[in-house]
Image: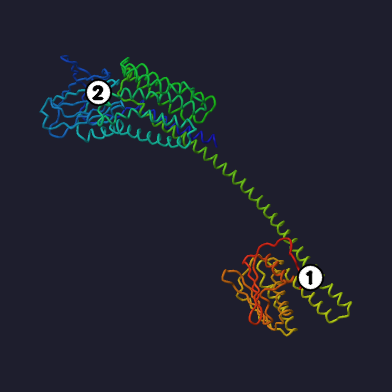
């Protein structure tokens, strides 16, 4: 995958390199069908000199005056077109000013040349000989330049002019917009990754290298013209920062003196210029320009060494853009030194290559981070799944153990109930049989059998099976009461659903009701018992049992163990029990929560029914 990715990057940069080299060898086409002016008279005071256009290497920072003699067709609208001039021109026709390119272009501070096309007013055109005076001004360190001049119609010259305006002016503004956008992106990345010094230095590099664009505001702030050399010196920081960025990209920590030099050297140059110790021209020529070229070459060497020696991918990504930028910068220096003809500085056009390189590095690092994040996410998901499976197993084991503990506790409780209940009944049966009382033996045996059935029946109760257990109790009470001639009125239709029911809890409810019924028959001599299930005003389940026997005492002097059993069992159920006398009988009210709590280990005091 890595080899394939490098191959595609190689194809991409090879294509970009071929396209980027076009300005170094391509010549823009000239207009066809238009009148071409190839000679002019250079005027210097009283001197006149015939020259051949294009005029190259006019001394920088001066005015040059050139006169053209034209035969102009006054029957149709004609235009004067200068493909390239550097850097400002005022144009006069027969002694009348008709154009000043300094009022149109906003490219101050971006060096390089511009293009001009001006309409020739028919009112100023004479039949035969017409004189056009061109006054060319060179600003800063750039030599002046005047290309061949063309005269023709808009159809002949318009396309060529628009093409050059796009290349010389609009394209530079597009580079500015792209650089500003990437600077903002890198700045945001640095704000979120402040420990990554690369993005901090990249932000400084992109911002400081834009100081040349401050000349765009010279219409608003005319004094910027005098400050442009200082901005150029300040931009020298960008050259040193390129070295720092190259070292960071290749994994090397830049020395501290280099980081300080990125700010001290430009500041020192500006200070010397402001104090008048050295002129701005000499500072730019002798310090800034050599420093820029030297830093570019050093950065290029660092990247080349890392790319060839260590096969560093990011070094390869930035190597070709920096190489083309270095070549373009050397080209511009040769123009400034008048060692190469041509007014167009190429370095500003090669900035997009560096921007593309920085953007690819940024996206590459983002992609690597996302890939690592995906890998970590996959790893964490796998670990999480493994932990969840382990927790599920532990939970299942814990549930099994808890279930087993509950079963053991239930078994222990039921065993205790069987032992306590049956042992008492059996002891009574043995004592009665020894006394020779067969009727009472039969009665005790039936009670023991009913008690055993009650315990066994409670074993089948599940979480919500209390109604089924109550129905079983109703059937046994019906048979028992029928033998005794007692009427039972039973209804649980309105009893709400109760959850959390275990066999022991169900047995507690059944025994409370059985104890109350036994007391109503034994002590109250009741002949009718009514049992109802409902919901009370607080939302709890409510079971009431009323009888028509002897009313119970409002304040009994002695509480029997049976009543103690009832209170103990209702406490285990988390409910309440109320016993109150009626005018003709007694009412027991049993309140239960809709979800019963788990029981403890003991049943408390118990007396067999």
Q: In the structure shown, which secondary structural element does the residue marked by tag 2 occupy? A: strand
Camera-nearest residue between 73 and 211: 211
Viewer-nearest residue: 380 or 167: 380
Name the quarter where the N terminus is drawn: top right
In the rendered image of this protein, does residue 255 appear above or below residue 368? above
Residue farthest along the bottom direction in this orientation: 485
Q: How many marks?
A: 2
Q: What label does residue 421 carry, if any? A: 1
In the displayed structure, 592 sits above or below 93; it is: below
Disc 1/disc 2 C-alpha distance (Å): 125 Å
| Sequence-first disc among 1 and 2 | 2
Q: Quadrant of residue 64?
A: top left
Q: Which residue is mark 2?
A: 146
Q: Residues within 10 Å of mark 1 (few under 14, many from 20)?
A: many
x and y percentages locating residue 49 in the rendered image: 19, 15
x and y, in percent, of residue 291 in the image: 40, 19
Q: Residue furthest front?
A: 557
Dot 1 falls on a residue whose secondary structure is helix
Frontmost of labels 1 and 2 is 1
Q: Foreground residue, 340 or 261? A: 261
Of 510 and 475, which appears nearest the observer? 510
Residue 553, label in figure: none
Q: Is residue 460 visible?
A: no
Q: Is residue 480 left or right of residue 291?
A: right
Quarter of the figure with the C terminus: bottom right
Q: Is residue 348 visible?
A: yes
Residue 538 in picture, x, y percent from top left: 57, 69
């Amino acid at each position: 995958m890595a080899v394939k990715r490098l191959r595609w990057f190689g194809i991409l940069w090879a294509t970009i390199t071929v396209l980027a080299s076009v300005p170094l060898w391509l010549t823009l086409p000239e207009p066809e069908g238009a009148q071409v002016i190839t000679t002019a008279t250079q005027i210097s005071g009283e001197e006149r000199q015939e020259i051949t256009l294009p005029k190259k290497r006019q001394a920088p920072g001066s005015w040059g005056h050139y006169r053209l003699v034209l035969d102009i067709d006054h029957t149709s609208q004609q235009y004067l077109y200068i493909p390239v001039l550097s850097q400002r021109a005022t144009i006069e026709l027969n002694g009348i000013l008709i154009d000043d390119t300094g009022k149109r272009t906003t490219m101050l501070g971006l060096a390089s040349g511009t293009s001009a096309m001006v309409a020739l007013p028919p009112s100023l055109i004479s039949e035969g000989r017409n004189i056009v005076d061109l006054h060319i001004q060179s600003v800063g360190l750039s030599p002046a330049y005047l290309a061949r001049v063309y005269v023709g119609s808009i159809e002949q010259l318009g396309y060529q002019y628009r093409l050059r305006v796009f290349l010389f002016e609009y394209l530079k503004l597009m580079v500015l917009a792209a650089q500003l956008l990437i600077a903002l992106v890198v700045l945001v990345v640095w704000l979120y990754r402040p420990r990554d010094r690369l993005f901090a230095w990249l932000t400084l590099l992109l911002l400081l290298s834009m100081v040349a664009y401050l000349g765009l505001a010279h219409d608003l702030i005319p004094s910027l013209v005098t400050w442009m050399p200082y901005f150029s010196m300040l931009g020298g920081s960008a050259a040193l920062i390129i070295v720092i960025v190259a070292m960071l990209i290749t994994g090397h920590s830049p020395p501290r003196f280099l980081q300080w030099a990125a700010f001290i050297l430009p500041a020192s140059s500006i200070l010397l210029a402001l104090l008048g110790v050295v002129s701005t021209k000499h500072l730019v020529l002798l310090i800034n320009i050599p420093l820029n070229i030297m830093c570019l070459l050093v950065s290029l060497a660092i990247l080349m060494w890392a790319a060839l020696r260590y096969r560093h991918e990011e070094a390869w990504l930035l190597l070709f853009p920096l190489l083309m930028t270095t070549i373009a910068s050397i080209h511009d220096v040769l123009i400034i030194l008048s060692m190469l003809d041509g007014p167009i500085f190429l370095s500003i056009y090669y900035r997009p290559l560096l921007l593309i390189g920085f953007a690819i590095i940024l996206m590459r690092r983002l992609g690597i981070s996302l890939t690592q994040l995906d890998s970590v996410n996959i790893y964490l998901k796998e670990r999480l799944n493994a932990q969840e499976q382990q927790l599920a197993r532990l939970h299942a084991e814990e549930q099994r153990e808890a279930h087993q503990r509950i079963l053991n506790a239930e078994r222990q409780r039921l065993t205790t109930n069987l032992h306590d209940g049956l042992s008492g009944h059996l002891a009574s049966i043995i004592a009665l049989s020894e006394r020779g009382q067969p009727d009472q033996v039969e009665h005790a045996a039936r009670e023991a059998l009913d008690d055993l059935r009650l315990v066994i029946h409670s074993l089948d109760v599940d979480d919500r099976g209390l109604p089924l257990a109550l129905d079983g109790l109703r059937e046994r009470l019906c048979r028992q009461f029928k033998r005794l001639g007692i009427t039972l009125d039973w209804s649980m239709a309105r009893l709400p659903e109760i959850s959390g029911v275990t066999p022991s809890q169900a047995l507690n409810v059944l025994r409370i009701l059985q104890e109350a019924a036994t007391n109503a028959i034994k002590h109250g001599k009741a002949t009718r018992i009514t049992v109802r299930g409902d919901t009370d005003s607080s939302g709890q389940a409510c079971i009431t049992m009323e009888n028509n026997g002897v009313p119970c005492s409002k304040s009994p002097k002695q509480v029997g163990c049976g009543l103690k059993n009832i209170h103990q069992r209702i406490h285990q159920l988390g409910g309440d029990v109320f016993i109150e006398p009626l005018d003709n009988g007694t009412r027991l009210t049993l309140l239960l929560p809709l979800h019963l709590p788990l029981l403890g280990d003991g049943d408390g005091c118990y007396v067999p029914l």
